[in-house]
Image (cartoon, grey):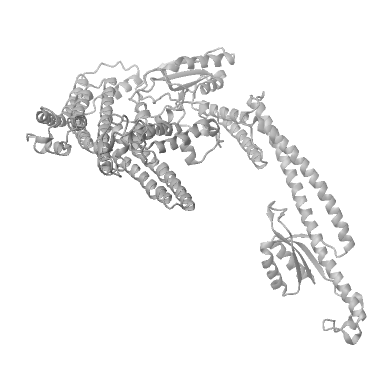
């Protein structure tokens, strides 16, 4: 369904007339012609190569080429997202509208960007390694400096103390150690590096077990996370240094380091060399930092340049890909000089399509123009309704039940008014209606911003139905004024109440002693009814009868629309043997009930309508007595009852008989066939097929059973559907009572404590309950019930919904998401 900015000038009830068109387009202008038709968005192509796979079609290579370009654009988008840049929605215009030049440019940009990423990754890895190496030099150097200072202090202490006064911590073999040859001392090896902090305990435990405790491990915590050179992620690490003796211990230590992904770095125990290496590493780090910053600046500059034209390039690639997809649906003529297309288009768009084809011929300097030819077919055309942003949501409500059959009456026109009105009957409160209106106006005022963003599922659904909710809010305010409810509180908006206290000394005028002292309240329910003892019986009676009146009116509208459908399709059988008996049956019973309700309201009679309707069937000739509302009521009831009884066989028997008679008359002369010349075997085969179809037998029993089911469904549905409209009364009463409970039992109760804290808590609870229950749950409940009343009770009277949508080839319908 294509959206437009205005209503069409033709009949709104029916879809636009469609036609099957045959196009013959020269190959030279085919791509340009399809592109212009995509801009127009009024032609639905048929796939003439359905038997071929996508790889066997003519333009498979071009589609693959566009797919590769789309992949590069997705790569650019991901890179911009990682860099924190956003592509501009208003792309600058460029001359790269040619697909060949754009393909070359995208390839060059991708190569440059890949090279920059590779260089940046290598520099980042080197920078991370040097930073870890610097940490190892600082932390491990601290181990050696502290050990050397403690050894020097201990040596001085030993030299000062006499031999007999040495502490228990002094070495027992000090003289032997001092006299031993230094060349015979054991040289210890060391391994240093960084290990993830979460693995440090397991690392230490495995080292101890693997070497049987013949190593010395020292660890130091690194403040803050460190970027790991391998993974590129920030990890909490510890610096370690392991002292060992022997090659076997060294090999075990190296394998354990690899298993725990501990990065190892060389280290020397010479303090002078340590200081020199720290100085060199610090210098290299500053140089690398400057180089990385310059590279990132250059990369971001390139990404910004891409971002300025990203949307234009993306749209161009999508358009070209969709054009070639459409060209693959066309068949190539034997001469290889033209493409043949078939498809549907509105009759009103014929001139626009022909002008687009002529423009494509002129722009490509083609010597031969495209041919536009209308085909005669018995195939059912697609259904096409012109809608705008206001009416499209209402049309979607109807299409969710089923797309209208071609030229069938469109219930979407009436849904614009009936759907929000029936919702408002169940949701009548002008305070809640104002809340809905304010929320909807926010979406309507900022619709341009929201339409260009990706929203969540619930927000997107709400935004798409913003005009439906807008109408629902307006009607809710209207019905709320009729019910005189503002968060269940009545107001004297249109004047003072018509009722006053009978006794001036009575204190509670809302419970007893009321009498009419003024003219009737001019609009809606009198505010004095709220809170009185008669409120619930009065509103129950009012809303129940109002629901029946609305239901019978809408069902009559559905039956009337079935008449217009039958008249448009020249189906006299449905007019005389479906529309007429259905109108008689429905109005003989429930139309008469509606008449009694109106007469009772106008006369103020106390007649019992339940008694009247029940005994109309049980004792049609009994005297009505006090329940008689007008003269001749008993005779009218007998007449209506007989009419309803006659209407049932009227719907059941005649239609199958006349269908059988029409079938026999249509094929009465089929036993005599023309002599065939036999010169055109294809024509002979077509004639044989036609004759075989013409001699199909008429299954009278099948038609009769179908009509019987339809009759029973209508008769029972007339009762059940009328009762189904009582949901209007039930949900309206439930909404009013819930609102009253929240107001009385939460807000007024909290107000009565004269405590600020309790009052604030009560207000918060009242607002939360109002929003959560009444504005969300009750709105959804009333919406679904109104939806059911339209789909089942209204549309089943006339709407078949067996058609399919008109889906033209249009660039405006291209998805905003990138396709693979």
Quadrant that contains the C terminus: top right
**Residue 469 drawn at (x, y percent):** 42, 34
Query: Residue 723 vs residue 220: left or right?
Result: left
In the image, residue 734 sits, relative to residue 147, either above or below, namely: above
Q: Residue at x 11, y 35 (%)?
A: 626
> Where's residue 453, x and y in %?
55, 35
Hey, which quadrant is residue 567 in on the image?
top left
- Is residue 180 shown above or below 561? below
Residue 14 in the image: above or below residue 295: above
Quadrant of the rendering where the N terminus is positioned? top left
The image quarter containing residue 27 is: top right
- Residue reaching furthest bottom? 164
Q: For residue 614, which quarter of the picture?
A: top left
- For residue 198, say whether it is visible: yes
Given residues 240 and 351, the one toward you in this image is 240
Horizontal side of residue 456 vs 732, given as left or right:
right
The single residue placed furthest to the front in the displayed view is: 505
Please state the total of marks drawn on the protein image: 0
- Percent position of residue 119, x then y: 75, 43
Side of 625 where 270 appears, left or right: right
Asked whether 121 or 586 is in front, the reply is 586
Measuring from the top left, give residue 412's x and y in whole percent.
37, 28
Q: Nearer the viewer, residue 662 or 78?
A: 78
- Residue sitting nearer the eye, 302 or 54: 302
Confirm whether residue 401 shows in the render.
no
The residue under the point 37% across, 32% down is: 493
């Amino acid at each position: 369904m294509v959206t437009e900015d205005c209503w069409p000038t033709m009949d709104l009830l029916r879809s636009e007339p469609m036609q099957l068109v045959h196009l013959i387009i020269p190959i030279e202008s085919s791509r340009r012609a399809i592109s212009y038709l995509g801009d127009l968005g009024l032609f639905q192509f048929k796939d003439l190569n359905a038997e071929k796979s996508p790889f066997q079609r003519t333009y498979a290579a071009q589609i693959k080429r566009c797919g590769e370009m789309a992949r590069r654009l997705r790569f650019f988008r991901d890179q911009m997202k990682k860099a924190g840049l956003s592509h501009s929605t208003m792309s600058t215009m460029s001359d790269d509208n040619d697909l060949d030049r754009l393909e070359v440019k995208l390839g060059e940009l991708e190569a440059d960007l890949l090279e920059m990423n590779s260089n940046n990754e290598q520099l980042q890895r080197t920078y991370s390694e040097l930073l870890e190496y610097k940490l190892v030099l600082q932390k491990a150097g601290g181990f050696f400096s502290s050990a050397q200072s403690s050894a020097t202090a201990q040596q001085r202490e030993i030299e000062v103390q006499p031999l007999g006064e040495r502490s228990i911590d002094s070495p027992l073999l000090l003289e032997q150690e001092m006299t031993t040859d230094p060349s015979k001392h054991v040289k210890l090896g060391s391994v240093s590096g960084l290990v993830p902090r979460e693995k440090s305990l397991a690392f230490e435990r495995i080292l101890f077990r693997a070497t049987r405790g013949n190593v010395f491990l020292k660890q130091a915590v690194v403040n803050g996370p460190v970027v790991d050179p391998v993974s590129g992620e920030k990890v909490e690490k510890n610096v370690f240094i392991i002292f060992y003796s022997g090659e076997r211990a060294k090999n075990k230590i190296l394998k354990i380091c690899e298993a725990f992904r501990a990065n190892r770095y060389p280290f020397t125990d010479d303090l002078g060399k340590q200081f020199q290496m720290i100085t060199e590493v610090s210098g290299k780090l500053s140089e690398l930092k400057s180089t990385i910053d310059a590279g990132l600046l250059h990369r971001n500059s390139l990404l910004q340049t891409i971002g300025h034209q990203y949307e234009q390039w993306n749209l161009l690639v999508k358009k070209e890909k969709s054009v070639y997809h459409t060209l693959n649906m066309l068949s190539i003529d034997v001469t290889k000089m033209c493409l043949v297309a078939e498809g549907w288009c509105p009759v009103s768009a014929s001139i626009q399509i022909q002008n687009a084809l002529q423009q494509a011929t002129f722009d490509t300097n083609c010597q031969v123009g495209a041919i536009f030819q209308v085909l005669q077919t018995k195939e059912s055309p697609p259904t096409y309704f012109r809608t705008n942003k206001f009416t499209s949501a209402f049309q979607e409500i109807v299409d969710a039940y089923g797309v209208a059959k071609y030229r069938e009456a469109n219930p979407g026109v009436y849904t614009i008014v009936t759907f929000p009105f029936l919702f408002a009957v169940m949701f009548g409160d002008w305070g809640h209606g104002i809340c809905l209106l304010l929320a909807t106006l926010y979406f309507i005022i900022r619709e341009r911003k929201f339409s260009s963003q990706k929203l969540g599922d619930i927000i997107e659904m709400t935004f798409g139905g913003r005009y439906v909710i807008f109408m629902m809010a307006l009607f809710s305010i209207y019905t709320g004024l009729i019910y005189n409810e503002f968060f269940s509180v009545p107001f004297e908006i249109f004047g003072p109440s018509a009722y006053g206290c009978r006794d001036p000394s009575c204190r509670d005028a809302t419970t007893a002693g009321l009498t009419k002292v003024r003219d009737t309240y001019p609009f809606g329910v009198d505010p004095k009814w709220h809170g009185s003892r008669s409120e619930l019986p009065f509103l129950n009676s009012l809303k129940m009868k109002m629901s029946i009146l609305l239901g019978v009116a809408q069902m009559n509208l559905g039956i009337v629309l079935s008449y217009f459908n039958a008249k448009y399709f020249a189906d006299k059988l449905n007019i005389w043997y479906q529309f007429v008996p259905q109108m008689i049956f429905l109005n003989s019973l429930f139309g008469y009930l509606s008449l009694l309700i109106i007469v009772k309201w106008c006369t103020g009679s106390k007649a019992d309508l339940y008694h009247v309707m029940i005994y109309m069937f049980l004792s049609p000739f009994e005297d009505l007595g006090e329940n008689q509302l007008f003269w001749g009521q008993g005779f009218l009831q007998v007449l209506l009852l007989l009419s309803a009884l006659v209407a049932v066989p009227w719907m059941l028997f005649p239609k199958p008989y006349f269908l059988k008679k029409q079938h026999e008359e249509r094929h009465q002369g089929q036993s005599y066939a023309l002599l065939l010349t036999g010169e055109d075997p294809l024509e002979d085969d077509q004639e044989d097929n036609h004759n075989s179809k013409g001699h199909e037998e008429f299954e009278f029993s099948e038609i009769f059973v179908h009509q019987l089911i339809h009759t029973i469904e209508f008769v029972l549905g007339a009762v059940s559907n009328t009762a189904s409209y009582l949901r209007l009364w039930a949900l309206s009463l439930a909404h009013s009572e819930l609102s009253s409970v929240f107001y009385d039992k939460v807000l007024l109760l909290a107000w009565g404590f004269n405590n600020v804290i309790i009052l604030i808590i009560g207000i918060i609870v009242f607002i939360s309950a109002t929003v959560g229950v009444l504005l969300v749950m009750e709105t959804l409940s009333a919406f679904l019930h109104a939806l059911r009343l339209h789909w089942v009770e209204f549309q089943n009277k006339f709407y078949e919904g067996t058609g399919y949508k008109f889906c033209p080839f249009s660039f405006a319908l291209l998805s905003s998401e990138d396709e693979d």
